[in-house]
């Protein structure tokens, strides 16, 4: 299992914080760029009516097709990314996929809203609630009420983040009330093999600190390298050299 992610911390104030960058996924035959933009909105937006989460977006790229698919069982998280016939995502459980998550006040996975749902060790994995989803042109949108990674009261023997004396879920409900607004765009002008992944976290209350894991992809083991693309210099670079 290979994972790429962007994680940043911010004090919980009423502000919008944006971060952006590029990641390149490669094996011997394929190269796709994933561009992310994250934003934090500390307010609760109006909700749209719920819709089906089994969506597919197909866009021609380099004499082939990029195919993105979401599944209702993962509350609209991206479960499949196919290019030139090659699957780029691992979707064996709710914690993999291409998705976003957050955690607060140093509790780690014990207070961990997660787009795709709960841990495979949880009695109920389907805890995220899809509020809206649609595909139009080369774009896909979803809004999801993220479920907590652990079910209420679920044991966590390793200890909760920095609070190692806590050994069970801090959350008291299965679904967090933290909304994730996601927009995916395949094929940008001048960059046909770029996927722009924009996510907005709607945090409904105050915390002392938060960690936001935006646009995290879990890929098959054969993908052993994750490179960042530097658009200023038009070059792929190793993450350690950023």
Image: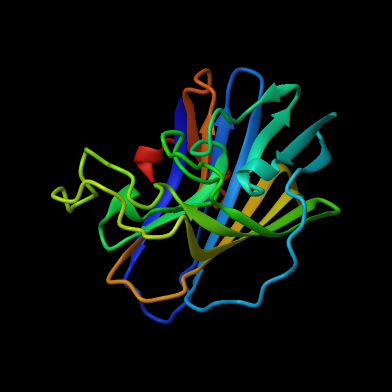
Vertical order, 87 against 233 (above or below): above
Q: Which residue: 28% across, 42% down? A: 155
Q: Along the horizontal axis of the image, is 138 left or right of 197?
A: right
Q: Which residue: 43% across, 39% down? A: 122
Classify residue 103 by image quadrant: bottom left
Vertical order, 238 against 84 (above or below): below
Q: Does residue 214 show up? A: no
- The colour scheme used here is rainbow
Classify residue 58 by image quadrant: top right
In front of the other: 78 or 49: 49
Q: Along the horizontal axis of the image, is 50 left or right of 177?
A: right
x then y, percent, for residue 208: 27, 71
Task: Give the number of marks.
Answer: 0
Give the residue at the far left of this rendering.
165
x then y, percent, for residue 18: 49, 67
x then y, percent, for residue 186: 74, 47
Vertical order, 94 against 150 (above or below): above
Vertical order, 214 against 216 (above or below): below
């Amino acid at each position: 299992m290979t994972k790429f992610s962007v994680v940043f911390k911010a004090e919980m104030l009423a502000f919008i914080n944006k971060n952006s960058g590029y990641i390149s996924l490669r094996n011997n035959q394929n190269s796709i760029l994933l561009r992310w933009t994250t934003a934090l909105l500390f307010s609760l937006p109006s909700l749209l009516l719920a819709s089906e989460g089994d969506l597919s977006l197909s866009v021609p790229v380099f004499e082939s097709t990029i195919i993105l698919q979401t599944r209702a069982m993962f509350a609209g998280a991206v479960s499949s990314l196919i290019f030139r016939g090659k699957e780029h995502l691992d979707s064996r459980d709710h914690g993999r996929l291409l998705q976003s998550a957050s955690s607060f006040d140093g509790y780690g996975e014990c207070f961990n809203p997660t787009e795709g749902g709960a841990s495979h060790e949880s009695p109920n994995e389907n805890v995220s609630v899809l509020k809206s989803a649609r595909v139009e042109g080369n774009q896909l949108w979803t809004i999801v009420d993220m479920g907590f990674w652990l079910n209420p009261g679920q044991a966590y023997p390793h200890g909760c983040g920095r609070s190692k004396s806590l050994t069970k879920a801090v959350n008291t409900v299965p679904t967090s009330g933290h909304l994730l607004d996601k927009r995916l765009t395949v094929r940008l002008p001048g960059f046909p093999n770029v996927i722009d992944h924009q996510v907005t976290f709607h945090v409904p209350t105050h915390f002392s600190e938060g960690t936001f894991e935006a646009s995290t992809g879990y890929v098959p083991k054969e993908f052993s390298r994750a490179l960042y693309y530097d658009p200023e210099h038009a070059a792929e670079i190793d993450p350690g050299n950023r």
